[in-house]
Image (cartoon, rainbow, N blue to C red):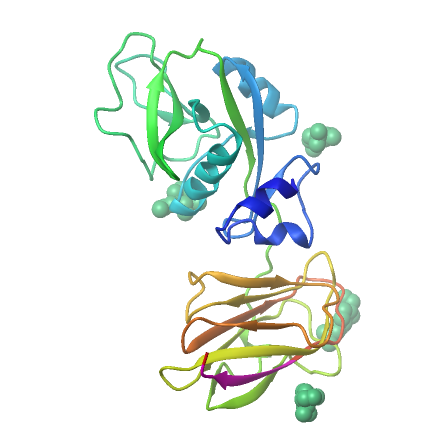
Amino acid sequence: MLKLILLSTALFFSAFAQDNPCPTTQWKYDETSNSCFLPSKHHSTFTDATTYCSGFNSTLVVIHSQQIETAVNTIVYYEDSRSVWWIGLQRSSPQGSFTWVDGTPLNYTDWQSGQPSNTLGANCVGVFLKSGLTGGWQNVPCVQQQPFICFIPNAVTLPTSNPKLCPPGTYQGPSGSIQSPNYPANYPNNADCYYLITVAAGYKVSITIVSFRTEYCCDWAYIHDGNAESSPYLASLRGVVPAGTSYKSTGQFMLVHFTSDESTNDTGFNMTYTAVAN
Ligand SMILES: *[C@@H]1O[C@H](CO)[C@@H](O)[C@H](O)[C@H]1NC(C)=O
Ligand SMILES: *[C@@H]1O[C@H](CO)[C@@H](O)[C@H](O)[C@H]1NC(C)=O
Ligand SMILES: *[C@@H]1O[C@H](CO)[C@@H](O)[C@H](O)[C@H]1NC(C)=O
Ligand SMILES: *[C@@H]1O[C@H](CO)[C@@H](O)[C@H](O)[C@H]1NC(C)=O
């Protein structure tokens, strides 16, 4: 598990260091897509790979977004970048349309040029990297033996939104602090709060934990390097984080997103921020 963290410069697997909500430590957790991935280098036919994944109540990986595609490509890159890796996409005949093994719609594709091909029997799909993390999909005969990736989406149950409970959402100026709702008393269940910190153009946001205590399994503070949830993660925090831990943005914005689930709470957090020149 750790090999990938250490090698990956991408932020996608940065949550590993804290915890892994996946079935076993062989699985990789990607917080961006909140999904678990199990790479298997055991070369198998498409059918055998499907059976193997179902043993974990999982399926071959289903790709509905660029985030999942990037996680898949990152795994392939570090595990075995010279093989085609099965994903959970197949068709019943060369005339049929491709469908995901979990029955969800095909609403994202990344075919390599010239693909899918009409080669007889080429009814199953794999990812093949062309250079670095860039690759794409190609269809090959299902009886070929290839490595594969099992997949569990929505690994951690995320809470429903309840913005009424939250402190103010915007913070501007050279310094300040943000707290979880009710701090230092316990935060409520089902909180879903955003804190957008903006400092002057040309400066960066440096944020420091004064106090951080949340329910370890389920109450998270995500720190984004930018002003949107789609901005890269600087950290995903839960449980106890030591005072003095700090994070710095690369630009003038930092977005903190706090969520708690429907039960169990704690005192939450107080963090201070300042604008820094570099
Ligand atoms: C798969 O799900 C079933 C039913 O929820 C459960 O009984 C079984 O333990 C699960 N198997 C694994 C390997 O998680
Ligand atoms: C594609 O469909 C899946 C499953 O229904 C959904 O979760 C996902 O958000 C959809 N993606 C896009 C880009 O519409
Ligand atoms: C904290 O959780 C307990 C148990 O779920 C709940 O009874 C209590 O109301 C929660 N505290 C707050 C401040 O919502
Ligand atoms: C948060 O921490 C700062 C720095 O220690 C402190 O000045 C501030 O009073 C704290 N805020 C709350 C609400 O406790």
Write the residue at 31% across / 35% down. 110
Whether residue 149 can be seen here: yes
Most extreme residue toward the front is 278
Camera-nearest residue between 188 and 48: 48
Whether residue 180 can be seen here: no
Write the residue at 63% across / 66% down. 190
Q: Main secondary structure of the magenta part?
A: strand
Write the residue at 61% across / 40% down. 3
Write the residue at 56% across / 23% down. 41
Most extreme residue toward the left is 114
Q: Is residue 272 magenta?
A: yes
Quarter in which the N terminus is drawn: top right
Residue 4: where, in percent of width, then height? 58, 42
Task: Give residue 57's quadrant in the image.
Answer: top right
Residue 13: where, in percent of width, then height? 56, 49
Q: Quadrant of ligand 2?
A: top left
Residue 240 vs residue 36: left or right? right
The residue stretch that appears in magenta: 271-277
